Image (tube, grey):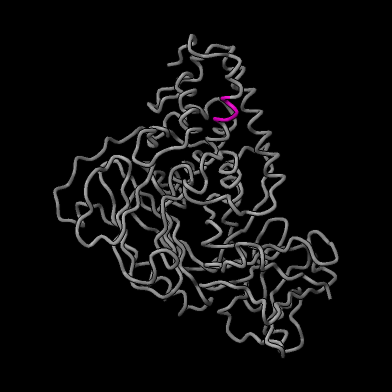
Amino acid sequence: MVNPALVDPATVRATAAEAWIRAQPILRNYRALYAQALDDADPSYVGGFGVFRHHPQPPTPADTPAETPDVTPAAVPVPVTGGEDGDTPYSRAWLDLRAEPWVLSVPAEDRYHVLPLQELDTVYAGFIGSRTTGPQAGDHLVAGPDWRGEPPPGIRSVIRTATRLVGILGRTRLTGNTPTEVAEVAAVQERYHLRPLHEYAGTPTPTPAPEPVWPVWREEVPDGLEFLAFLDFLLGFFPADGPVPLPPAETDLRGRLVDLGVDGRGEFEPAALPLELRTEIERGIADGRARLTHAIAGLRDRAGLFGTREQIGADFLRQAVGAATEPHGLPTEEAWYGRWEADSAGRHPPDAADRDHVIRFAPDALPPARFGWSTTLYALPDHRLVDNTLDRYSIGDRTPGLVRDQDGGLTLYVQHKRPADADHSANWLPAPDGPFTVVLRLYGPDRVVLDGRWRLPPLDPR
């Protein structure tokens, strides 16, 4: 409980603002965890902890955009940065690492794939996949902060996490929207295998961790004082003294929160606070919301929003922006996103109702990526895929039948009606009869992309 004697009322407002921002990625992840691992009535339920649910079928225009912001308070305007990614169908799972580690096994696979281990606050503990561990088959140990054992024989790598709960949103490259290709991706996904360590090693089953009283998620939680009660519960899965060191700013904030009664035991009661402190906390929440709103409004690209704890550090605001705009975004070295939000004539957003557009990649400036690239078009304002006669929603390096320019370059024809010219039709990226945006994704981008030497070509009206 809070000890008013330890609390300086003059600092409560600033602490509450910082805590509210710090809590945003944790709350967003808990919302996803609650729906996918705890609430068996939710359509996104995966089956509990330690279970994969695969989605090999690519999205269609009828599907709800996957990255629609749904946790950030309504007062915070949030741009959707990407939308559903039809290139890399998802494999979802959650792990409870309190009793023992889990072993994640992957098959030998040349197809691009990544299985990122995302901690409770959306920071990445590590990555298993084409870029990091290669195409070889392997068994990888995922160990939480309480484990002090030695990995058994056969383990290729060990990923240590700072939190006791972690999520996996795996991606596997889909190179075509055909039944055969979808079946091939499904076959790869089915070979992603999760086992508790005792099952893998053939050792006795450990004593299970006690079942928590999981707080029921409600959409209004991030908007008021109750966010601290949820944060208090969730910090119990995020120890400050684990083997993964936390930055000094995190330790400092934790200390100030303990003075307010938020100590990770899950016993915080907002109503028990003196009225003066409740008032200051509410003011701090408003300050934090204003800071997040301002940061999102100034967002120009996603570089630096996602990464490991070494990459992110204690930049709580940057984490909150990343969680608000794309809660499971990958770091740019894994997947780089570019976006055409305006055409070269300055129309923002571009509009296909009364003009056609082209995107031309020069022969020496094709998208440079180790594992491939794609362009996907979304209708605005709801960021949905565009219904069309070809059932084509993206064009990339694996799209069959593309026609190169005479000089070896590549021109994409972005327009509402199918081009009459056969070569243009082969390179047609269907647009709506209205405003749109186009997202370019590079998987394993080359260094020239990451350091800014390669840039998006213009979207030119015709």
Q: Main secondary structure of the magenta part?
A: helix
Residue 238, horizontal then vertical, whole percent: 40, 36
On screen, residue 127 above or below 294? below
In front of the other: 449 or 15: 449
Q: Quadrant of the N terminus?
A: top left
Residue 125 is a magenta residue: no
Span colored in magenta: 15-19
Residue drawn at x 58%, y 49% is 305
Residue drawn at x 39%, y 69% is 134
Q: Quadrant of the C terminus?
A: bottom right
Residue drawn at x 60%, y 39% is 317
In front of the other: 336 or 200: 336
On screen, residue 94 above or below 384? above
**Within the image, what quadrant is residue 280 found in?**
top right
On screen, residue 113 above or below 362? above
- 304 on left or right of 263: right
